[in-house]
Amino acid sequence: MRYFLIDRVTDVVPGESARGIKNVTLTDEVLHDHFPDFPILPGALIVEAMAQLAGFLLEVSENAPGKPIVRALLGQIKSAKFTTPAEPGDQIEVVVRLVRGLDTAAEVHAEALVEGRRIARAQLTFLLRRVDSERVHAQRRALYHLWTRRLGKEIPIP
């Protein structure tokens, strides 16, 4: 099972912030059970979308040629608040900002917006760990390439 919850990265400033979108559609399998006659995207998946974009931001910020590749692993959800459900037809704009970076960890503030209105926010902490798996690196490179192919600027993909 794969949950890739970012459809496209719309902006990234390594070391600072990233923006991306998640389109909510009735083809999202989870909406058929959550809930019948009132489909909404589960809050846990909104947080996962935030975490995926934050992980992308951290990985393009932290990895550099000649250094071992590190991957961002979600370590803590300090807080998550939801104000409005996301429904089929909504386009969620996810915005993440690096709050604090350490050698082996980072804290990120994340928001989810629909039509400019915030529907959720969270404080996320990540562990930055070396992962010795070419399969992981190949999967991330392929995914990040898909997310950024229409970005209009070159981003080194670790």
Image (cartoon, helix red, strand yellow):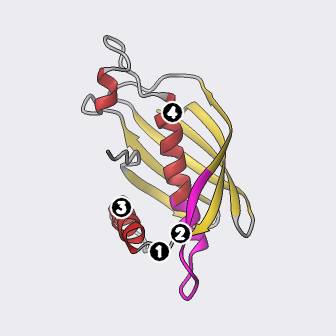
| Amino acid type at image mark 2 | Val
Numbered disc 3: secondary structure: helix
Which residue lies at the image location 37% right of the left edge and 69% below the top edge? 135
Is residue 103 placed above or below 32 in the rendered structure? below
Numbered range of the magenta stretch: 56-74
Instruction: Tell me the element at label 1.
Output: loop
**1 and 3 marks in contact (CB < 8 Å):** no
**CA distance for labels 3 and 4:** 21 Å
Q: Locate residue 102: give its quadrant.
A: bottom right
Badge 3 or badge 4: first in the primary sequence: 4
The residues tagged by marks 4 and 2 sit, at their Cα atoms, a distance apart of: 24 Å
Which label's residue is closer to the chain start, 1 or 3? 3
Q: Between disc 4 and disc 1, whose residue precedes?
A: 4
Within 10 angstroms of label 4, few (less than 14), some, or many (20 or more) residues? Answer: few
Disc 4 + disc 2, Cβ < 8 Å? no
Point out which mark residue 58 bears: none
Relative image position of residue 128 (x, y in whole percent): 63, 64
Q: Residues within 10 Å of mark 1 (few under 14, many from 20)?
A: many
What residue is pinned by disc 1? 158
Residue marked by disc 2: 60
Identify which amino acid the numbered label 4 is placed on: Ala
> What's the distance in space between the residues labelled 1 and 2, CA to CA?
7 Å
Residue named by callout 4? 44
Q: Is residue 59 magenta?
A: yes
Helix, strand or loop for disc 2: helix
Task: Identify the element where label 4 is drawn.
Answer: helix
Precedes in sequence: disc 1 or disc 2: 2
Q: Are marks 1 and 2 in contact (CB under 8 Å)?
A: yes
Rendered image: mark on residue 143: 3
